[in-house]
Amino acid sequence: MGIVNINDDSFCDDGTLEVDAAIGHAVRLASEGADIIDVGAESARTNREAISVDEETGRLLPFLRRMNLALSMVSPRDDDQVWPPLISVNTWRSDVAEPILSEGVDLLNDISGLTELTNAELCLKHGVSLLIMHTVGLPKVPHFHENYDDVWAALFAFFEDRVTKAKALGLADDQLVLDPGIDFAKQCKDNLKIYGQLDRLVGRSKSPVLLPISRKTVIGDVLDLPDPNTRDAGTVACLVAGMRRGAHIFRVHDVAAMHAALKVIWSVEKVSV
């Protein structure tokens, strides 16, 4: 899953407010091997004010309405790539989701933790898959001091509740994606435990598991690297750890490097079996 930010306050300073530039970036990610393009118009950073619903929608719609045509002009990197790439939209507000889900969207990446069911209902209505991310409280609100006696017990209880509610509405297991929410309302030790024991979640889930790995704060904590753009080597390490523990989707900035790393590791794993 390659990341496209249509904003001017991305934590990696890789965002743009120019639709042409965002589309160009998405096409480049696709040509480098992205199976999914995840586009967001509002930064998840809690030290930034939320933008308005109209502004967020106004950034997303022009991108979505032109993206499929742009992708038709390039070719897949190899025979294994999902083509054309699926389109994921990273938003949590139902007022934004409602007008965009009919614009060729395949996945709603909801970082709100499904605190209310409107987004699940919209996904069912539009035939769109839903990503459910573990977190505590609403987005754009800091949760830096959350502590868990047992982070896995908290994740299991959370996903059991949210998946049960989503399925009760009519969404199937293969229409849901689970995201353990690395760096969201968690401490470094919690994030490392999730990376190291991800097979616990994969083993009990009937839905695919997305692992957020790219330039995460936990990598900066381990390597003492405050600049997110210096964390790609650590990102590769998280990629390998996640791949060996069964993760299905990796959300990344540098698709070309991660595609190459994953292809080599996958080849090694197949030979070693």
Image (spheres, rainbow, N blue to C red):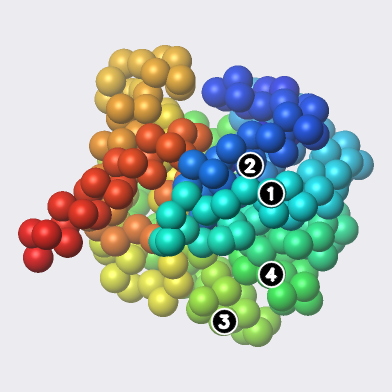
Q: Which comes sooner in the sequence, label 1 or label 3?
A: 1
Q: Which comes sooner in the sequence, label 2 or label 4?
A: 2
Callout 4: SS = loop
Q: CA distance from mark 2 to mark 3?
A: 30 Å
Q: Amino acid at mark 3?
A: Ala
Crowd band around label 1 with a 10 angstrom C-alpha radius: few (<14), some (14–19), many (20+): few
Q: Nearer the viewer, mark 2 or mark 3?
A: 2
Q: Nearer the viewer, mark 1 or mark 3?
A: 1
Residue named by callout 3:
172
Q: Nearer the viewer, mark 2 or mark 1?
A: 1
User: What residue do we see at 57% from left, 81% from top?
Assistant: 172
Q: Nearer the viewer, residue 91 or 266?
A: 266
Asked which quadrant contains residue 189, the reply is top left
Q: CA distance from mark 1 to mark 4?
A: 25 Å
> Is the C-beta separation of discs 2 and 1 under 8 Å?
yes
Q: Amino acid at mark 1?
A: Met
Q: Which comes sooner in the sequence, label 2 or label 3?
A: 2
> Is the C-beta separation of discs 2 and 3 under 8 Å?
no
Q: Which comes sooner in the sequence, label 2 or label 1?
A: 2
Residue named by callout 1:
73
